[in-house]
Amino acid sequence: MTEPDLYEVVNPATEEVITTVELGGAAETDAAVARARAAFDTWRRVAPADRARLLRAFAAAVDADREHLAALEVANAGHTIGNARWEAGNARDVIEYYAAAPERLFGRQIPVAGGLDVTFQEPLGVVGVIVPWNFPMPIAAWALAPALAAGNTVIVKPAELTPLTALRLGELALQAGIPEGVLQILPGRGTVVGQRFVTHPDVRKVVFTGSTRVGKEIMAGCAARVKPVTLELGGKSANIVFADADLARAAATAPYAVFDNAGQDCCARSRILVEASVHDEFMALLEPAVRGVRVGDPADEKTEMGPLISAAHRARVASYVPDAAAVAFRGTAPDGPGFWYPPTVLAPVRHDDPAFTEEIFGPVVAVVPFRDEEDAVRIANATEYGLSGSIWTRDVGRALRVSRAVEAGNLSVNSHSSVRYTTPFGGFKQSGLGRELGPDALDAFTQTKNVFISTEE
Ligand code: NAP
Ligand code: MG
């Protein structure tokens, strides 16, 4: 017997070890795939109404466990209690939403000569889901719910740093009656468990959410096996504020569009573009809003921003703000244990500054002025990423023109919302491939089979 690979799970707000989790290796991954492959043969044949009922029972189990799941995420990821409750509720909602799918997985009947032609939406088989540490619950749910609904079996590999809520979701699925092997949670290293999802011939699809760098490796590995992938990757989204906007509201909400989850959000609006004529006025309104962000104990109901996920990640975030950086103003952060970093606003910033071009994934935002609509769109699109963004204006025509011109998958006008489980989510350019959530997510977990039945005598 080899020694188990044990991983100490740390509370990022206190730096205390919460628990120890055993990481799976290559042998455990292969065993999990074999179980998932065996379970697929029965799960795909479960009657649609029964699969729907089991998923609704799973959603109900998540609902009943919401406070517990939220507390786990506060402790494991440093999420504020308000956010963590929303995330547990989102996992429930996504499972419930796709519980309606098994009974609505329609094929088509296509007119042909000499017979009947019908299509079936067939499940793929075993789906491997690789989850990052920033939103462990929602990101796991967005993949596992439609995948299971379509008749696939699923193995989730949570991020090493944040396995606890995923493990709990796995327990809740079993409690709800989902058969053994249909949904498995396998903590492990990306380079071991995640990589095996890519190479194992019985894993028929990989869903990866994480960095663009690793996403490219996953896609290349899947290409060698013609294995479909969904990729949700990084972002460097623009919050574009026009002079005719409700400036007070735009400034009051801008901090939350980037500092929520301590900036560890692929949709973070980490570039604020402001029309030059109102730049100074906007900065004067932004300063008190940033200083007012409540940073501290994530378990406190009033807290708006918690710590970063790890010491290593904090060092990486801090590297974008060297001593010589033009810090316009900053919020506060606690002293003492915990991976704290204060909300930080950079201005003026050159357009080639790494803080303006690279994803920081922390509470750092850069503000730059623009001349006119064309200039705003040009700056917004001058990035390899294209995930989300916001447009603040009272001019409906302009809102639509700029929404169509910005190369990103998820835009909001006079709002910063990016995610609704009923609407599609995903990236343009190097922010990803494929769409999650919304009515079409089942397409990513099914393949079309065409059957022709002759009516010739
Ligand atoms: P990451 O290093 O890419 O890791 C993401 C996941 O992939 C983790 O579970 C990781 O396992 C695993 N992994 C790492 N190397 C792998 C490999 N060679 N093969 C297979 N799996 C591998 O990203 P992260 O640092 O956790 O998350 C931050 C990044 O994710 C940011 O760039 C952010 O924008 C992006 N993100 C995007 C979205 C979106 O929806 N577009 C959502 C969230 C995050 P380990 O835990 O062992 O490293
Ligand atoms: Mg990593």
Image (tube, rainbow, N blue to C red):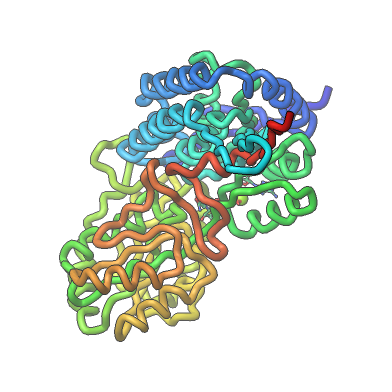
Where does residue 25 sit, x and y in percent of width and height?
A: 75, 33
Q: State which quadrant residue 351 falls in.
A: bottom left
Task: State the residue in front, 28 or 409.
Answer: 409
Give me the residue at 56% from left, 29% from top: 148
Which residue is farthest right?
1
Q: Is residue 394 above or below residue 33?
A: below
How many numbered marks are there? Answer: 0
In the image, is residue 105 above or below residue 46? below
User: In the rendered image, is residue 319 in sight?
Assistant: no
Q: Is residue 247 left or right of residue 157?
A: left
Frontmost residue, 450 versus 275: 450
Quadrant housing residue 192 = top right
Dividing the image into 4 quarters, which one contains the C terminus?
top right
Residue 391, image x, y percentages:
30, 67
| Left-right relation of 320 to 253 | right
Please tell me which residue is depicted at 35% across the width and 67% down the height of the picture.
403
Residue situated in front as seen by the camera: 213 or 47: 47
Please state, as top left, top right, bottom left or bottom right, where the N terminus lies in the image.
top right
Left or right of 43? Residue 401 is left
Q: Residue 8, image x and y in percent?
A: 59, 33
Q: Position of residue 185 (x, y in %)?
A: 61, 28
Q: Residue at x 20, y 79 (%)?
A: 278
Looking at the image, is 274 positioned above or below residue 49?
below
Residue positioned most to the front:
457
Q: Is residue 450 visible?
A: yes
Residue at 32% x, 52% y is 417
